[in-house]
Image (cartoon, rainbow, N blue to C red):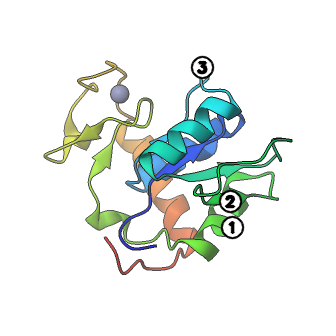
Amino acid sequence: MAGVPTFAVDRSLGRLAIWLRRLGFDTVSRADLDRHRLETLAAREGRVLVTRTQSGQRTPARVETLFLRADRFRDQLREIDDRHPLGGWQDRGARCLACNAAAPGGARRRERCRRCRTSRPSRDHDARMERELRALSLRASDAL
Ligand SMILES: [Zn+2]
């Protein structure tokens, strides 16, 4: 797949979605999106569906689906990285970790998200996330 992937993450994997946003990926994951609605959205918007469970029904054929086996977000990120390199986040734009809104202009410095008003992580928290990500040694992506 060409270009930077975008993701539709099962609502049971909310923590993983936060990390994908921290990596700069456009990642939809909402409590009100059940599996069927998430698949519909993934098909419509060309998103990679990320889940841990089979749905029982056929996923639309044009939706790329990643079935994760891992329980922990670090291992889940590695599983995704095997398929879609997740590195290179420093060169991607920032996103609100809570609502996925793009934060143009390096809005990690902004106190609150303009869309959902969630406070951005503290500098310490953000630095911890950065260290976690570096420790994962994610593959560099060609498509930034
Ligand atoms: Zn937000």
Residue 139, placed above or below residue 134? below
Residue hosting label 1 = 79
Asked whether mark 2 lies closer than 8 Å to ligand 1, one says no
- The residue that appears at 55% across and 35% down in the rendered structure is 29
Q: Quadrant of residue 2?
A: bottom left
Label number found at residue 117: none
Residues at marks 2 and 3, CA–CA distance in whole angstroms: 21 Å
- For the residues bearing labels 2 and 3, Cβ distance under 8 angstroms: no
Residue 47, placed above or below residue 134? above
Q: Secondary structure at mark 2?
A: strand
Q: Nearer the viewer, residue 38 or 124?
A: 38
Residue 20, placed above or below residue 88? above
Q: Secondary structure at mark 3?
A: loop
- The residue that appears at 65% across and 68% down in the rendered structure is 78
Residue hosting label 2 = 66
Which mark lies nearer to you, 3 or 1? 3
Residue type, mark 1 in image: Glu
- For the residues bearing labels 2 and 1, Cβ distance under 8 angstroms: yes
Picture coordinates of residue 50, whole percent (x, y): 64, 51
Q: Secondary structure at mark 1?
A: helix
Residue hosting label 3 = 32
Residue type, mark 2 in image: Leu
Question: Which of marks 1 and 2 precedes in the sequence?
Answer: 2
Question: Which of marks 3 and 2 precedes in the sequence?
Answer: 3
Q: Nearer the viewer, residue 89 or 8?
A: 8
View quadrant of ligand 1: top left
Name the side, left or right, on which 72 lies relative to 96. Answer: right
Residue type, mark 3 in image: Asp
